[in-house]
Image: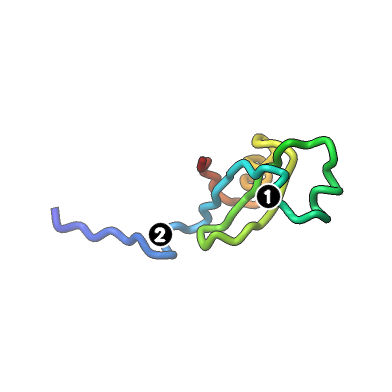
Amino acid sequence: MNEKFSFGPEASGNLVYIRRVEIDTLPEDVRRQVPDADALYAVHGVDGERLALVADRSMAFMLARQNELTPVSVH
């Protein structure tokens, strides 16, 4: 009952967040590189830093796992 839990940065370990990003929210130079896409998927670190943008959700999860990260979907 008196067990302590850590919710700080060390608790998140290698966790990353996957979320859909609408194309119109991205900078113009990025939009030019994907003219036919409606959205991309971003991989974010626990601090909110965008680590990667990829074409689809499954690719985002695969990229995270290949880099020994634990992906979690956010909306």
Position of 24 with respect to 19 (left or right) is: right
**Residue 67: percent from left, percent from top:** 65, 52
In the image, residue 58 above or below residue 44: above
Q: Amino acid at mark 1?
A: Thr
| Amino acid type, callout 2 | Ala
Asked if 43 appears above or below 49 in the picture, the reply is above
User: What is the spatial separation of the Cα atoms under label 2 and label 1, in whole angstroms?
Assistant: 31 Å
Residue 70 is left or right of residue 63, and the answer is left
Of mark 2 and mark 1, the one earlier in the sequence is 2
Closest to the observer, 49 or 16: 49
Q: How many marks?
A: 2
Mark 2 residue element: helix
Residue occupying the point 86% across, 48% down: 32
Indicate which label's residue lies in the foreground, 2 or 1.
Answer: 1
Identify the secondary structure beneath mark 1.
helix
Which residue is at a point 43% across and 64% down the rendered structure image? Answer: 10
Q: Is residue 10 left or right of residue 35?
A: left
Identify the coloring.
Answer: rainbow
Spot occupied by residue 36 in the image (x, y as percentages of width and height): 83, 35
Q: Work out whether residue 26 or residue 68 is closer to the camera in this orientation and state it.
A: 26
Residue at 80% from the left image edge and 54% from the top image edge: 28
Image height check: is 7 above or below 35? below
Count neighbours of disc 2 (C-alpha within 10 A) and say few if under 14, some if 14 to 19, many if 20 or more. few
Q: Does the CB distance between marks 2 and 1 fall below 8 Å?
A: no
Residue 33 point in image, percent of width and height: 85, 48
Tell me the residue that label 1 is attached to: 25
Q: Which disc, if any, is residue 11?
A: 2
Crowd rating for badge 1 (residues with CA inside 10 Å; few <14, some 14–19, many 20+) = few
